[in-house]
Image (spheres, grey):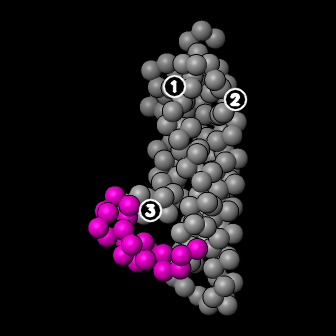
Amino acid sequence: MLKLPLKYYDESGRILPPSWLYVVLLLLCLDWLAFVFSVASRSQTHDLLMFFYPQKESLGMGLAASLPVLLSLALLSQRERLWKRDVIKWRAFIVPLIQIGITALLAVQLFYAMHHHWGFEYVTGVKIVVYAIALYVVSKSRHVKWMIEDWAKPNPQMN
């Protein structure tokens, strides 16, 4: 009996990451996306960075806080290469890395709220709500839990 519908499995019988997980991880890495796109536009790098991050330390704090999420996204994207080398212990770090990253991003937003004397700002409020929901969803997802358990076997066809 399969735990999930057949569309959530790859050709070799491994559970695929849910598509919503990629969306959540990309939303959590918005600081990295803004940084990469601003650097890609060499003539307007300074202007774009000043538009998105008026305070210079906000970019660095956002990049540092979302680094664990970026690392987990990289691990997810390179899973086939890691499996071919029979490296499977990394799978246990995916959810904790995401949780650490979300907690750090929440801490950054709370720091900004405190820095602005708890004055309400829509962007900060939306980010806090999105990060809290993301932390709950990633922590409680049965799909992600089953995926991590399923990835314990490097070659499911042989087991």
Find residue 34 and report its image quarter: bottom left
Which portion, as a residue range, is magenta? 38-57
What residue would you read off at disc 2? 89
Q: Considering only order in the chain, which callout, 3 or 1, is on the residue closer to the N terminus?
A: 3
Residue ID for mark 1: 81
Circle 3 residues within 10 Å: few <14, some 14–19, many ≥20: some
Left or right of residue 153, residue 157 in this image: left
Whether residue 13 is visible here, answered yes or no, is yes
Query: How many angstroms separate mark 2 from mark 1 (CA)?
Result: 13 Å
Give the residue number, with chain letter if any, for mark 3: 35
Q: Where is residue 75 in the image (x, y as percent from the top left)?
A: 56, 38
Name the residue rendered at 55%, 50% in the picture: 70
Amino acid carrying label 3: it is Phe
Q: In this view, does 71 lie above or below 109?
A: above
Q: In which quarter of the image is the N terminus?
A: top right
Q: What element carries label 2?
A: helix
Amino acid at circle 1: Arg
Q: Is residue 42 magenta?
A: yes
Q: In the structure shown, which secondary structural element does the residue marked by tag 3 occupy?
A: helix
Q: How far apart are marks 1 and 3 (CA)?
A: 27 Å
Residue 51 image point, x, y percent = 40, 78
Amino acid bearing label 2: Lys
